[in-house]
Image (cartoon, rainbow, N blue to C red):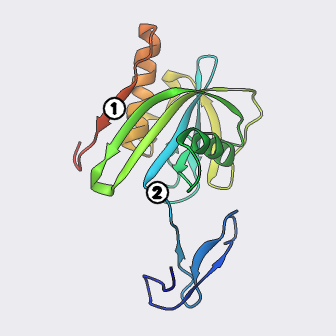
Amino acid sequence: MKYCSACGAEVGLRVPAGDQRPRHVCTACGSIHYLNPKLVAGALPIWEDKVLLCRRAIEPRSGFWTLPAGFMEIGESTGEAAIRETLEEACARIELGEMYTLVNLPQISQVHIIYRARLLDLDFAPGEESLETRLFAEHEIPWEKIAFRSIYLSLRHYFKDRANGHFLFREETLGALS
């Protein structure tokens, strides 16, 4: 990339504040241009009968709760992305389990992949993109404050499967109004 898609000025490679990777940053307007795949990977971290959620400190949906998840980086697998995002957003170490939900969001050109995971310890805390991290039992989850439909579905499936005693892989497609 040589020119900013926002203003047309030249871009340069540098590591923006709070980031670890060089990005194309506009020398005039400061726009950061990310070259990421449109895959979001995350984890459903479990400790006993509770799920670890993060309250978002960034848009979209700042202040709402979500599972630790985010855009994959080029050169990493979906599992590596889920582990990294959990560490970045919740400072939590996990043992990754199987892929649990895959949610297609064609209207925004994204695919959200969530893995079941086991928290390795209770040493977690909010990362830079989180206001708060907390373990929730099913009855404590702030369902009306869940940030994204894909996360809401993944959590609902998890608690239903846990009650049934077996976990199924789920793939769904969400439309603009579903």
Q: Residues within 10 Å of mark 1 (few under 14, many from 20)?
A: few
Q: Quadrant of the C terminus?
A: top left
Q: Residue at x 51, y 43 (%)?
A: 41
Q: Marks 1 and 2: CB-CB under 8 Å?
A: no
Q: In the image shown, does 41 or 55 lie closer to the viewer?
A: 41
- Could you tell which of marks 1 and 2 lies nearer the N-terminus? 2
Above-or-below relation of 97 to 77: above
Q: Which element type, helix, strand or loop, lies under badge 1?
A: strand
Q: Nearer the viewer, mark 1 or mark 2?
A: 2
Q: In the image shown, does 76 or 136 lie closer to the viewer?
A: 76
172 on left or right of 129: left
Residue 107 image label: none
Q: Which residue is mark 1?
A: 171
- Farthest residue in the front direction? 75
Q: Amino acid at mark 2?
A: Pro
Q: Quadrant of residue 104?
A: top left
26 on left or right of 103: right
Q: Quadrant of residue 24?
A: bottom right
Q: Amino acid at mark 1?
A: Glu
Above-or-below relation of 113 to 7: above
Residue 37 image label: 2
Residue 47 percent across, percent down from the top left? 65, 22
Per the model, the C-alpha gap separating discs 1 and 2 is 19 Å
Q: Residue at x 62, y 54 (%)?
A: 129
Residue 71 percent across, percent down from the top left? 51, 53
Q: Which element type, helix, strand or loop, lies under badge 2?
A: loop
Residue 11 can be seen in this image: yes
